[in-house]
């Protein structure tokens, strides 16, 4: 009798924990992104998920990014070419956005480039993750390593099965657990989750009223390439292009990019 009671109690606790996990309506995760390209930066970013609708919004706070001085000094020691051009550009909106409807397999970008806010329909890519048994603890969660080759870039991520939500930073998703860390193998980009809140009252408002124009993905790539070259290339060293070090390097469309 006591044995049966213990079993029933255990099952009830498991059921309660499971119901608690899946009864959540929203997920709000704060990340820090470390960018290691010419001018090393740290960005505060947020993933907001509507669990009922299976939609997510990822917001990168570009306006308030800060320089990682320690990392910048290390990189400058290794640089043999110094830029003679210092340029900056204002913004209309603080954040850039990645908006995903995971059921409809639809992904949209809203980004500010040169005080022009563009609305871009991206291609929803099916992720071919390679899951490993390698594990480590992150913020009290047991996480497992997974890898992927995505649009020409190799990624390593750590996801937590105890947080059974297939979301993650930026465009990374599709694993059986929330992605708490992610980095490109070349070391240019790293994401680290710093806070996880369920059913948060916080939300992300998309500034649709600020959109200047809706453009194709091809137009977006070419405009971004032109702007980046104008801002970051040394006029005497035109082959030095940071655009080729972005998170994506291979695309489904043929675009006239300077570094290709």
Image (cartoon, helix red, strand yellow):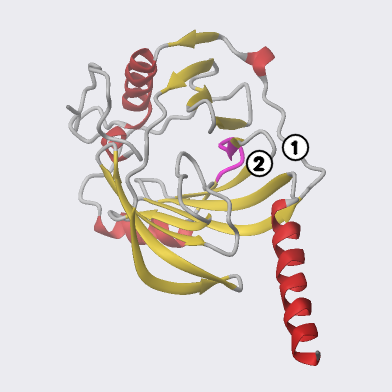
Q: Where is residue 194 in the image (x, y as percent from the top left)?
A: 62, 60
Q: Which residue is drawn at 68% across and 13% down?
A: 209
Q: Position of residue 137 (x, y in %)?
A: 52, 74
Quarter holding residue 11 = bottom right
Q: In this view, does 2 lie to the left or right of 228?
A: right
Quarter holding residue 9 = bottom right
Residue at numbered disc 2: 48
The CA distance from mark 2 to mark 1 is: 7 Å
Quadrant where the C terminus sits is top left
Q: In this view, does 95 lie to the left or right of 12?
A: left
Residue at numbered disc 1: 203
Which span is picked out in magenta? 58-65
Q: Position of residue 127 (x, y in %)?
A: 36, 42
Q: Where is residue 140 in the image (x, y as percent from the top left)?
A: 61, 74
Please tell me whether residue 21 is drawn above or below residue 233 in the rendered image.
below
Please tell me whether mark 2 sits on a helix, a strand or a loop. strand
């Amino acid at each position: 009798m006591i044995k049966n009671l213990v079993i029933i109690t255990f099952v009830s606790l498991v059921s309660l924990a499971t119901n608690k996990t899946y009864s959540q309506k929203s997920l709000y995760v704060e990340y820090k992104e470390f960018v290691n390209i010419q001018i090393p930066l740290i960005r505060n970013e947020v993933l907001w998920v509507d669990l009922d609708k299976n939609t997510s919004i990822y917001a990168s706070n570009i306006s308030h990014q800060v320089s990682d001085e320690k990392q910048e000094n290390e990189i400058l020691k290794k640089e043999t070419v110094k830029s003679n051009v210092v340029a900056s550009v204002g913004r209309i909106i603080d954040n850039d956005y990645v908006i995903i409807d995971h059921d409809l397999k639809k992904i949209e970008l809203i980004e500010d480039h040169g005080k022009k806010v563009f609305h871009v329909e991206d291609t929803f890519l099916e992720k071919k993750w390679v899951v490993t048994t390698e594990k480590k603890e992150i913020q009290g969660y047991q996480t497992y390593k997974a890898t992927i080759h995505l649009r020409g870039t190799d990624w390593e991520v750590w996801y937590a099965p105890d947080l059974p939500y297939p979301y993650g930073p930026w465009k990374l998703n599709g694993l059986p657990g929330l992605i708490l860390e992610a980095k490109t193998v070349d070391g240019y980009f790293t994401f680290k989750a710093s806070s996880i809140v369920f059913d948060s009252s916080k939300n992300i408002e998309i500034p649709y009223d600020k959109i200047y124009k809706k453009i194709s993905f091809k137009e977006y790539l070419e405009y971004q390439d032109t702007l980046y070259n104008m801002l970051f290339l040394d006029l005497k060293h035109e082959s030095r292009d940071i655009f080729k070090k972005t998170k994506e390097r291979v695309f489904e469309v043929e675009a006239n990019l300077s570094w290709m």
